[in-house]
Structure formats: C-alpha cells, structure tokens
Image (tube, rainbow, N blue to C red):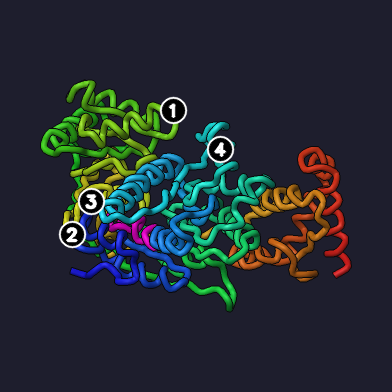
C-alpha cells in the first residue's frame, strides 16, 4: 500500500487514511506530487480511479495550511475553479466535495483543531439569480462551473473581478471536449482567465485515456516553449468483461418487432441478475421508449429514463433514486456517460453501436467502480451494420486501441464570439491590440490558444474584418466604445 504524502496537512492525512484505509489509487499517488510541485498536470486514467480527489485534495490541503498561517481564517476569495462539461456533473461534484470538506473539519475538531469552513458552490445555467448575487457578495473558495458559465463570468465585469484570485483551474472530463468546438472555446477562455489573474493559475486536467494524449495536454496548457505539461497516462489497464449478444434470428437492415422483444427480454433477465444496470442508447426518444417497455416487464417503480431533455428536478430525482437503490435499471443517453456519481453499477448494456471506442470504454467504465472490480458490459446490436460495428469495437478495445483525437482547425465562429466578448468588457480601456502589434492584456495570452487552434494572425485579422460588417450590431450589444476598439484594431492590423 502506498502511503499518503507526508506534505499533507495532518487533518487531511488522517481523514484520507480513515476514509480509504487501502491507500491512494495510482492516479492519486502519482498525481499529488506533480500538482503539489506546481506543474501543470494531465491525469489520464479509467473512470472510477479517483482522479477527482487526486486534483482537489492538494488544493484543499493548501487552503488549510494558509488558514493556519493566517490565524485560522480564509479570505472570501475564489481559489479554485473546477470546470465540468455537464451541468449535472458539475452539480454532482459540488455535492460530493461538501462531504469530505465537512468530514475533514469534523475530524480536526475531534483533535481540538479549529479549521475554517471551505465553501464549494456551483455556478451554472441552473443557478438561481439569488444564488448568483450571493456569490458576488461572498465568493466561494471552490467554484464549480461549466465552460459556458466560465465564459459568461469572464465577460461580466463584476464576476471577472471575483476571478482575479484564482490559483488553480481543474478541467474535468477534458476528453469530452478535446475533439470539438467546446474545447476550442474553453481553450480561449482559459487564456483569458490566466491574463486576468494576479498569479498564473495552475492547470489540472482529468481525462479518460486519449490518443494521442499529447493533443489533449496541448489543449489544456497551450503551445509554445514556455508551456509544458506533466502527463500521467495510466492507460486503459483495467480488465473488462465484454460480450456481444444477438437475437436468435438473423439480423437485417432493421430489427423486427420479434427481435426487439427478444433483446428486451434478455436485458430484463440481465437486470434481474444484477443489483443495478445502466442501459445506454443513442437517442432520447429511444431512451423513453425502452424505459417504458422495460418497466412493463420489471415494474414501473424499478425502471426510469435519463437524458438531457429532462428538467433539473426530475433528473436529480432519478439520480437520487438510483443512488438509493430504488431503481434496478436506468435507460440513459450520453447524459450519464461521464462521471456523475450514481452509486454502484454492476452491469452496462449498450443498445446499438457505441460508434466509437472511447464511448464504449466510457460507458462500460460506469460499472465496477469498486477498487479491484471489473467493469462489465453487454452490447446488443439491432441491425446487421450495428453487429459489424459492435464486433469491430469489441476487437479494438480488446487490442488496446483508442480513437484518435482530432481537434477542430480554425473554428472562426468560436474566435468571433470570443472577440466580441473581449471587446465588450473593454468599454473604456483603449488597449485592444492584435497579435504582432503589441502584447497587451488577455488577447496576447490568447496567442498560445490561437496557435494550437490553427488560427494565425492573418486569420484573426480577417475575422475582425468580417465583424466590422456587423459593427452596428456590436454597438447595440457592447456599446459604441467596443465598436470603436474593433475599428481601431482593424486599422492597426492594416498598418502592421
């Protein structure tokens, strides 16, 4: 067993040893020293391997030590920003942080040590106006948010000021954004945040295994000679119990009613043989339909659906029921693909093709979260084409292969949106300059993001030229001063 690092605060060490007597997982044992040394770090490991605690515990330890040095108190300032790709996952992390923070404080009280309250709050699209106003008055020490909400926080003048104190940024499930425009958007937001802060924030990325992992690390920290990242790649080392199950009759272009009945009957048998089962499908409509069909076989109170169109209240109610053991089966889309805490899952069933190796690994990895447990998954193709894809996916995973990450190149719509947001908040600050003209404020910082998004200065200039065609609209949104700054920037680019 690997011991907890000696550099941890005594209360943190005692809590971890009491809570996890078997010791740290490998991502924790290797991640803590790298993070504590102040190096940007990317931890790539299978789902359920303790990555979140690997990132957070060093931050909590630092806050407790600083509180001791200050006589037992902490300023009302945000120290850590945690970015999650899903609102539901962000909410889940915020809840799960509250428990260890309270337990560490209670354990310290047992030893007659007074530790300050470390507050973790959620800021997302579901956050009420009252809660947002309260955060502005008294910022949390740990802010849990989404990429879109972080972008809005950086654009609003009052919330921007609350982010100046940030010293650590944690990007969870970064693999879910590395290959699309959300990742490009977040890359620019991270650079804007860095330029805003008094001290460059440490960046920590948490990811499922990716290929090539260097591409994901580049998205996290940027490019250039001054940017480096400690990569802790544990690879897909967990054994998997995977199999493809097909109906008795030959599959064709479309599944017959009899074949659907046979597939659902087999899944119902699997649900009965396991304590909790996740059934993944590829569309919301199919999730509702299959949940209804399975409920007819297993009972209305034992099956539910989960997808992105559900209201926040219903979604949380379903997740709570699954954690409490009230549900035997949950039919879900990608809404439960990432690391939301839903309690122990013994089996994952995939209806149709998972469409990628990464999706298959991520979904099956939702089962077998206990230390030493083996994730178990069953694939149910419904057509001949899906059978070929499922067989190929199974063969690829068995051989240890991974999908290649292909970030978008030159996403001009993302660039345009960030430019407008950037100049909007500069209403009375005449410092907007283009790359190559001067290195000022956060636009110069964005160069490292622009480079890795294949956005050269000429492309940036051309995008600004397009924006000038909509100068009247920019004036309405950002005020006359913002439009003037765009115009001056274009003139400077033409003269350069």
**If you read the primary sequence from the N terminus, does the residue marked by circle 3 or circle 4 appear first?**
4
Distance, label 1 to label 4, CA atoms, is 24 Å
Would you name the residue on which mark 1 appears? 311
Label at residue 134: 4
* In front of the other: 153 or 432: 153
Would you name the residue on which mark 2 appears? 21
Q: What stretch is highlighted in magenta?
A: 47-58
Residue 46 colored magenta?
no
Would you name the residue on which mark 3 appears? 369
Tell me if mark 2 has few (under 14), some (14-19) or many (20+) residues whose alpha carbon lies within 10 angstroms of its own.
few
Q: In which quadrant will I find the C terminus?
A: bottom right
**If you read the primary sequence from the N terminus, does the residue marked by circle 1 or circle 3 appear first?**
1
**If you read the primary sequence from the N terminus, does the residue marked by circle 1 or circle 2 appear first?**
2
- Disc 4 is placed on an element classified as helix
Distance, label 1 to label 3, CA atoms, is 27 Å
**If you read the primary sequence from the N terminus, does the residue marked by circle 1 or circle 4 appear first?**
4
**If you read the primary sequence from the N terminus, does the residue marked by circle 2 or circle 4 appear first?**
2
Distance, label 3 to label 4, CA atoms, is 36 Å
Magenta stretch, overall SS: helix
Q: In which quadrant will I find the N terminus?
A: bottom left
Q: In which quarter of the image is residue 397?
A: bottom left
Residue drawn at 59 percent across, 66 percent down: 199
């Amino acid at each position: 067993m690997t011991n907890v690092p000696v550099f941890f605060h005594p209360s943190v060490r005692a809590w971890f040893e009491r809570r996890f007597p078997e010791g740290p997982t490998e991502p924790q044992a290797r991640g803590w020293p790298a993070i504590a040394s102040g190096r940007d770090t990317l931890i790539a490991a299978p789902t359920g391997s303790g990555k979140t605690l690997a990132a957070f515990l060093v931050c909590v330890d630092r806050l407790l030590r600083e509180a001791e040095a200050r006589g037992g108190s902490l300023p009302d300032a945000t120290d850590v920003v945690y970015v999650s790709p899903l609102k539901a996952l962000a909410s889940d992390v915020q809840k799960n942080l509250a428990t260890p923070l309270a337990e560490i404080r209670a354990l310290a009280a047992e030893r007659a040590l007074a530790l300050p309250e470390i507050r973790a709050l959620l800021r997302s699209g579901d956050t009420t106006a009252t809660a947002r106003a309260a955060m502005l008055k008294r910022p949390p020490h740990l802010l849990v948010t989404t990429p879109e909400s972080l972008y809005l926080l950086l654009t609003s003048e009052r919330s921007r000021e609350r982010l100046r104190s940030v010293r650590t940024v944690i990007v969870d499930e970064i693999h879910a954004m590395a290959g699309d425009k959300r990742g490009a958007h977040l890359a620019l937001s991270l650079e804007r945040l860095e330029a805003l802060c008094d001290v460059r924030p440490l960046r920590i990325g948490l990811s499922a295994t990716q290929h090539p992992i260097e591409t994901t690390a580049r998205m996290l920290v940027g490019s250039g000679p001054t940017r480096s990242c400690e990569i802790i790649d544990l690879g897909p080392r967990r054994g998997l119990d995977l199999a493809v199950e097909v109906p008795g009759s030959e599959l064709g272009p479309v599944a017959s009613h009899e074949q659907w009945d046979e597939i659902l009957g087999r899944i119902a048998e699997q649900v009965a043989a396991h304590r909790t089962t996740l059934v993944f499908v590829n569309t919301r409509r199919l999730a509702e339909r299959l949940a209804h069909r399975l409920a007819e076989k297993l009972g209305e109170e034992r099956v539910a659906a989960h997808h992105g169109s559900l209201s926040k209240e219903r979604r949380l109610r379903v997740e709570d029921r699954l954690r409490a053991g009230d549900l035997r089966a949950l039919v879900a889309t990608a809404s439960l693909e990432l690391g939301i805490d839903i309690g122990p899952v013994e089996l994952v069933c995939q209806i149709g093709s998972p469409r990628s190796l990464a999706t298959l690994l991520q979904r099956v990895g939702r089962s077998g979260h206990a230390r030493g447990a083996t994730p178990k998954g069953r694939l149910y193709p419904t057509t001949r084409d899906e059978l070929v894809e499922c067989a190929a996916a199974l063969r690829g995973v068995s051989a240890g292969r991974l999908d290649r990450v292909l970030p978008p190149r030159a996403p001009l719509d993302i660039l345009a949106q960030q430019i407008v947001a950037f100049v909007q908040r500069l209403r009375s600050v005449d410092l907007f300059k283009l790359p190559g003209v001067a290195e000022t404020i956060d636009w110069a910082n964005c160069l490292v993001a622009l480079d890795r998004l294949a956005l050269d200065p000429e492309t940036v200039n051309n995008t600004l030229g397009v924006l000038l065609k909509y100068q009247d609209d920019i004036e309405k949104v950002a005020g006359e001063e913002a439009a003037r700054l765009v115009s001056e920037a274009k003139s400077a680019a033409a003269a350069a």
